[in-house]
């Protein structure tokens, strides 16, 4: 699929099918991120479906959500069919590699949250650099940076989700603009955190604009 | 105000399937909602709770699903439209009510939501509840999207009233937990006070009445089937000699597969939304011109067998298949590529199936697992620790029947405190059987909400029969796993939550338990002493381990404990904390001599439990904590 064409209005390009896979660890705000993206897609006139993990998996386990938009009816994404993988944690991003195809764009937080077996020395956390390199060999593009660090520097350590949304918005993979996403943040999220969230979001936009963060440029699309 | 109330007619909102069901009920003027929380149905109740605080909707978190269904049935018999939601296994608890409620019928519309869980994301089985509709003789609707969930819920009330029967709305996790565009209609106001019209010879199910009621129920099936024939929720699309019959979330996978395989001119699709009773004429008319038919439905071959039986009676010999070795499985949920591949195979088309990348193979080593874990500061872990140490000190090995809640995570090492689990309440009764058969020390665990839900009869039975086990009631003051819903014993409730408190201790005493200990599991010494005493005794013994869910307290009171702890140089590396306790905040620093324990102060909750049994753990000075944050 030619992602740049997605930026044209819907009427000129009726067969958009875009599938985004979000993965992270309980407490990282993946569900809010996928919901905000879904709301932005709805505002922009696409008919999004957002699928969420609730319940038992949230107690420190892996939390996955998906957003599909355009001419897609299925709310979930099959292995090998995600166009974009938004990874909130390095190991979990790599674990979800089976959802990618050779042209997928991966946006990865390089910060690691050691799972319990690693924290107690029963398993080894693979080197993040190696994980990212291996990812880059398998997919069309990799944008990788420390979103935790950017969230902290933007003043809210918990806003990793906003940083990643900003990076996604500036990655030229969505059929609507970063301003559309900001508008959703303004109207649909807790006003108490809005200023901090917008700062974190902008930091993500900046991260996507910095060439050094692109481990692999998605040349195939352009 | 809830977004489910503020949305105006004609507006399109992004609603979770569960929210869409609530909106649909509000658009039908629902007056009463009763539920017991259970994934994937919980948000239906949670949203209704919020709305009941803002409108005259009556809502309750009932003590279990049977209670909820009967409360709703009473209201529906009195002219109030009612809704009752539960997870699939909840309908087992309510099944006794369901089967005879179908005889009694309803006056105002009544909708029962059964949220099934293919793939067992958060359940103990993946039973297919569509058979309940068939067994009870109730009309059933199966939505395929949030929009349809809303429309079907709304329509189900009218359908229910027309037939005088409750309607089963059967969803699956991917409908409940998918957000999609939902276009709204007008909200309808609730009817005033209900009137219970006395008709004892219609509504009191003694044999003489029930014989007639059963006949009435069977007569209503023809009317229900006629409505299925005309239902707008059953749709035919496409053209060609091949056919696909589908329902629920699978209908979306079929629609995508047909588009992606370019089969619009070769395949006709019958999407069924009204699936009990089946629309026989519609199905036979659909089958007539076809050469072969694929049935796409998750879990059991409910539609497949129904359609085949209809075809057989009509003398049609075309192949109608769904489940089978080269086709679909009765296990787990489906996904788009699976449906596309099976459809391609069934119709003899070239399938394009490139195997997706295998991350583990690419890395060349196993990826570390990320199992869920009890939170730092969780009182359940503290109680488990005391039971472990007590048994160890007494030189005993225990058997641990457990129950359903967060504490079921005690299954995982290093706690390993779960040996047997069937369903809600099973801990108590299986403990009785295991101790009787083996004579071993049996320590059963049950949560407070689960105890009220399904534990009371079991404990009465154990007292009456003179069984021999220790029951630990893990009382964290809430229904934590499903999102902190209240239950009769709660002391910590959301502001303004109206409820009478039914004290657990007095309930247990009233059931006849004489050997009872109430402990705060976060106080180690007294808990350990009580646990040893209780393990050493015989007969029915109960420990109530009373300490609130740490997360719940944080959310309600909005403050975190400031205390933090650290492992000092005095650590002798015994690893007791790692081997028996397993708090996520207690970690091993990789080092040359096998590493040293440390406490991650970001994760530490400040519960101060470990400091009571490990001399090497000391509080971090307050100034140090605040400078770190």
Image (tube, coloured by chain):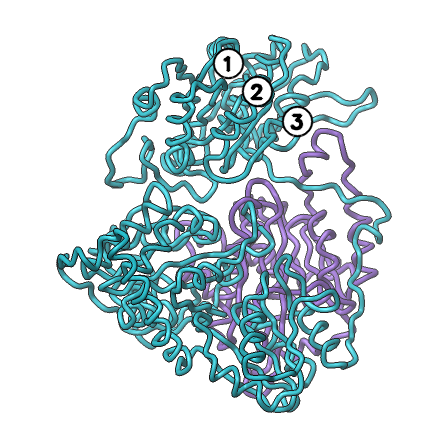
Residue behind mark 3: B414
Identify the mark at residue B380; answer none if there is no mark: none
Q: What element carries label 3?
A: loop
Query: Which residue is depicted at the point 51% across and 21% down?
Result: B383
- Residue B253, percent across and down? 61, 72
Q: Can residue B345 be seen in this view?
A: yes
Q: What element carries label 2?
A: helix
Chain name for mark 1: B
Q: Is residue B525 above or below residue B215?
A: above
Chain name for mark 3: B
> Which quadrant holds the C terminus of chain A?
bottom right
Residue behind mark 2: B385
Q: Distance between the residues labelled 1 and 2?
A: 9 Å
For the residue pair B131 and A186, the one nearer the viewer reads as B131
Q: Can residue B626 be seen in this view?
A: no
CB under 8 Å between callouts 1 and 2? yes
Query: Sequence-wise, which precedes: disc 1 or disc 2?
Result: 2
Residue behind mark 1: B524
Q: Which chain is purple?
A: A
Q: How crowded is mark 1: few (under 14 residues within 10 Å), some or many (20 or more)?
A: many
């Amino acid at each position: 699929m030619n992602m740049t064409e997605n930026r044209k209005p819907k009427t000129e390009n009726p067969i958009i099918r875009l599938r985004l896979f979000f993965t992270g660890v309980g407490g990282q705000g993946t569900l809010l991120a996928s919901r905000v993206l879904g709301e932005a897609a709805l505002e922009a006139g696409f008919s999004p479906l957002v699928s969420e993990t609730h319940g038992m998996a949230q107690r420190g386990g892996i939390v996955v959500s998906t957003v599909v938009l355009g001419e897609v009816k299925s709310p979930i994404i099959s292995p090998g069919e995600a166009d974009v993988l938004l990874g909130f944690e390095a190991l979990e991003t790599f674990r979800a590699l089976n959802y990618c195809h050779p042209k997928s764009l991966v946006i990865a937080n390089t910060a690691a949250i050691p799972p319990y077996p690693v924290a107690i020395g029963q398993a080894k956390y693979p080197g993040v650099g190696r994980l990212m390199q291996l990812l880059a060999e398998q997919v069309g593009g990799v944008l990788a940076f420390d979103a935790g660090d950017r969230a902290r520097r933007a003043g809210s350590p918990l806003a990793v989700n906003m940083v990643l949304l900003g990076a996604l918005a500036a990655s030229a993979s969505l059929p609507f603009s970063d301003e559309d996403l900001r508008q959703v943040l303004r109207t649909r999220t807790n006003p108490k955190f809005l200023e901090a969230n917008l700062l974190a979001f902008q930091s993500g936009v900046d991260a996507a604009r910095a060439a050094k963060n692109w481990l692999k440029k998605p040349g195939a699309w352009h | 105000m809830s977004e489910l109330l503020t949305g105006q007619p004609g507006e399109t909102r992004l609603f979770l399937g569960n929210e869409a069901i609530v909106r649909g009920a509000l658009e039908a003027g629902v007056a009463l909602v009763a539920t017991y929380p259970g994934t994937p149905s919980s948000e239906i109740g949670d949203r209704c709770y919020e709305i009941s605080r803002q409108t005259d909707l009556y809502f309750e978190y009932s003590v279990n699903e049977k209670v909820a269904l009967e409360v709703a049935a009473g209201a529906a018999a009195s002219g109030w439209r009612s809704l009752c939601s539960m997870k699939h296994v909840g309908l087992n608890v309510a099944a006794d009510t369901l089967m005879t409620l179908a005889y009694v019928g309803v006056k105002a519309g009544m909708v029962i939501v059964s949220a099934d869980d293919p793939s067992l994301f958060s359940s103990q089985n993946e039973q297919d509840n569509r058979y309940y509709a068939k067994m009870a003789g109730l009309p059933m609707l199966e939505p395929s999207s949030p929009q349809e969930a809303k429309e079907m819920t709304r329509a189900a009330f009218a359908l229910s009233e027309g037939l005088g029967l409750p309607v089963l709305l059967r969803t699956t996790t991917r409908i409940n937990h998918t957000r999609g565009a939902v276009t709204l209609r007008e909200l309808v106001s609730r009817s005033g006070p209900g009137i219970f019209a006395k008709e004892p010879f219609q509504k009191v199910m003694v044999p003489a009445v029930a014989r007639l009621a059963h006949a009435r129920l069977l007569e209503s099936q023809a009317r229900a089937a006629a409505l299925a024939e005309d239902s707008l929720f059953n749709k035919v699309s496409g053209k060609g000699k091949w056919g696909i019959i589908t329902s629920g979330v699978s209908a979306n996978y079929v629609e995508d597969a047909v588009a992606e395989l370019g089969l619009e001119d070769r395949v006709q699709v019958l999407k069924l939304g009204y699936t009990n009773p089946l629309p026989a004429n519609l199905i036979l008319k659909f089958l007539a011109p076809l050469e072969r038919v694929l049935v796409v439905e998750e879990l059991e071959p409910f539609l497949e067998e129904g359609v085949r039986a209809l075809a057989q009676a009509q003398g049609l010999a075309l192949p109608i298949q769904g489940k089978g070795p080269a086709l679909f499985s009765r296990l787990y949920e489906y996904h788009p590529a699976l449906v596309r591949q099976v459809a391609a195979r069934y119709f003899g088309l070239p399938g394009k199936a490139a195997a997706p990348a295998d991350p583990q193979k690419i890395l060349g080593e196993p990826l570390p697992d990320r199992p869920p874990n009890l939170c730092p500061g969780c009182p359940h872990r503290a109680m488990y620790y005391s039971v472990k140490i007590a048994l160890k000190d007494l030189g005993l090995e225990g058997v641990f029947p457990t129950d359903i809640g967060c504490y079921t995570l005690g299954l995982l090492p290093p706690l390993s405190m779960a040996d047997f689990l069937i369903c809600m309440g099973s801990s108590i009764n299986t403990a009785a059987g295991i101790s009787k058969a083996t004579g071993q020390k049996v320590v059963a665990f049950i949560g407070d909400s689960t105890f009220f839900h399904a534990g009371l009869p079991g404990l009465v039975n154990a007292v009456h029969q003179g069984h021999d086990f220790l029951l630990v009631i893990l009382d964290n003051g809430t229904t934590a796993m499903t999102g902190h819903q209240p239950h009769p014993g709660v002391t910590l409730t959301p502001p303004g939550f109206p409820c009478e408190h039914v004290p657990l201790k007095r309930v247990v005493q009233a059931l006849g338990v004489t050997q009872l200990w109430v402990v705060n599991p976060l106080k180690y010494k007294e808990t350990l002493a009580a646990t040893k005493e209780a393990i050493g005794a015989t007969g029915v013994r109960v420990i109530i381990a009373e300490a609130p869910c740490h997360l719940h307290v944080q959310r309600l009171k909005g403050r975190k404990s400031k205390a933090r702890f650290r492992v000092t140089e005095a650590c002798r590396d015994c690893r007791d904390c790692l081997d028996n306790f397993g708090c996520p905040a207690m970690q091993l620093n990789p080092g040359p001599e096998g590493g040293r324990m440390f406490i991650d102060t970001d994760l530490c909750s400040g519960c101060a439990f470990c400091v009571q049994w490990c001399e090497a753990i000391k509080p971090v000075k307050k100034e140090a904590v605040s400078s770190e944050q």
